[in-house]
Image (cartoon, coloured by chain):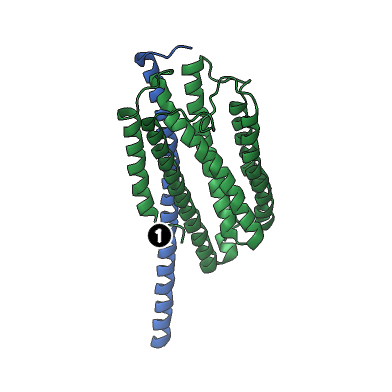
Chain colours: A blue, B green
């Protein structure tokens, strides 16, 4: 086939590069959502540890009062 | 552990990819035969090389896993293959677009280069379902390693077979007789290749760091709440522990 003129070739070239960019962006977005979930779970875990240590401290104070 | 050097790699990837694309469109001349549409070459070929290299790397990490029993190597192998599959999808899509523009067809079944890549891609597409089908993590890692080694060894064999086969319309790039690229095109191609390798390594480390953080978090949850309170592990294709 003869070479496509620039006007006809442009959309194909743009399409190929956009497919690549879209693929990378989708991948990074999925990874970012997973990272956000990890952060959320980490915050929950930190809260639970804090609640536990506060409860333990209260128990200790209660025991001292008795 | 896995995130070491990630920031530097990320910056290098962005700079290299931007630089490579700038060279493609502002420096490299249009191909005398194909014209402007040949610009897809600088994306399609490095993507294919890196994807196939990633499959081989997955096999190499799998060998190391079987040698040492270190689950970190299983994770490295899994992520390399996962990422190569994503890039492989890019190779098929960009290749189809280029084929349509150059040959007038999205796909040519008679061409060994295209079909062999599709076979490798479909072979490794079975890797994730294989892992998912096995419940026991130890067995999952071992079977997946054997699969990755066989698949990884198949890649260079496949490459050789394609070289020996007669080409129909797909050109043989980087062959001993095909070194007719002018200097500016060669430089642009090499920088695109380096950029793609850098991007692959960055994303590989990014996913490794994410998976590792997720595993550590799960282990921490279990240590704090106990196995029962943390609930059963959902079945997954990805390695769940190191």
Residue that protrudes farthest toward the front in the picture: B177
Residue that protrudes farthest toward the left in the picture: B26
Q: Is residue A38 visible?
A: yes
Residue that protrudes farthest toward the top in the picture: A2
| In this rendering, position of residue B165 left or right of residue B90 | right
Quadrant (top left/top right/bottom left/bottom right) for the C terminus of chain B: bottom right
Residue closer to the observer: A37 or B149: B149
Assess disc 1: are there few (<14), some (14-19) or many (≥20) residues with their C-alpha within 10 Å of its C-alpha.
Answer: few
Q: How far across and how far down the image is residue B46, in percent?
A: 47, 36
Residue at the image position 56 percent from the left and 67 percent from the top: B226
Q: Total of numbered circles in the picture?
A: 1
Q: Is residue B89 above or below residue B64?
A: above
Q: How far across and how far down the image is residue B60, in percent?
A: 60, 51
Residue at the image position 35 percent from the left and 33 percent from the top: B21
Which residue has dot 1 on it?
Answer: A43
- Chain holding disc 1: A
Q: How far across and how far down the image is residue B116, in percent?
A: 62, 30
Q: Is residue B237 visible?
A: no
Residue at the image position 53 percent from the left and 66 percent from the top: B225
| In this rendering, position of residue B239 left or right of residue B213 | right
Q: Is residue A64 above or below residue B182?
A: below
Residue closer to the observer: B156 or B224: B156
| Image quadrant assignment for residue A53 | bottom left
Q: How far across and how far down the image is residue B24, in percent?
A: 35, 30
Q: Is residue B129 above or below residue B61?
A: above
């Amino acid at each position: 086939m003869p070479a496509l003129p620039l006007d006809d070739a442009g959309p194909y070239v743009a399409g190929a590069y956009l497919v690549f960019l879209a693929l990378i962006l989708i991948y990074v977005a999925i990874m970012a959502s997973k990272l956000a979930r990890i952060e959320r779970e980490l915050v929950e875990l930190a809260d639970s540890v804090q609640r536990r240590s506060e409860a333990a401290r209260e128990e200790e104070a209660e025991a001292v009062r008795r | 552990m896995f995130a070491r050097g990630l920031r530097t790699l990320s910056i290098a990837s962005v700079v290299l990819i931007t630089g490579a694309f700038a060279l493609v469109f502002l420096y490299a001349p249009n191909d005398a035969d194909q014209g402007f549409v040949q610009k897809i070459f600088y994306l399609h070929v490095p993507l294919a090389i890196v994807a196939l290299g990633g499959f081989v790397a997955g096999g190499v990490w799998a060998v190391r896993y079987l040698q040492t029993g270190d689950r970190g190597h299983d994770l490295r192998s899994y992520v390399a293959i996962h990422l190569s599959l994503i890039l492989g999808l890019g190779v098929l899509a960009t290749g189809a677009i280029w084929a349509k523009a150059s040959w007038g067809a999205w796909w040519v079944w008679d061409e060994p280069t295209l079909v062999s890549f599709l076979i490798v891609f479909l072979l490794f597409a079975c890797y994730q379902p294989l892992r998912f089908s096995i419940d026991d993590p130890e067995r999952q890692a071992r079977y997946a390693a054997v699969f990755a080694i066989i698949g990884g060894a198949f890649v260079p064999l496949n490459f050789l077979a394609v070289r020996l086969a007669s080409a129909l319309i797909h050109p043989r790039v980087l062959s001993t007789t095909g070194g007719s690229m002018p200097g500016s095109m060669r430089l642009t191609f090499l920088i695109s290749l380096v950029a793609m390798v850098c991007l692959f390594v960055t994303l590989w480390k990014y996913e490794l760091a994410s998976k590792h953080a997720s595993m550590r978090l799960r282990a921490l949850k279990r240590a704090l709440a106990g196995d029962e309170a943390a609930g059963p592990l959902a079945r997954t294709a990805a390695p769940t522990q190191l």
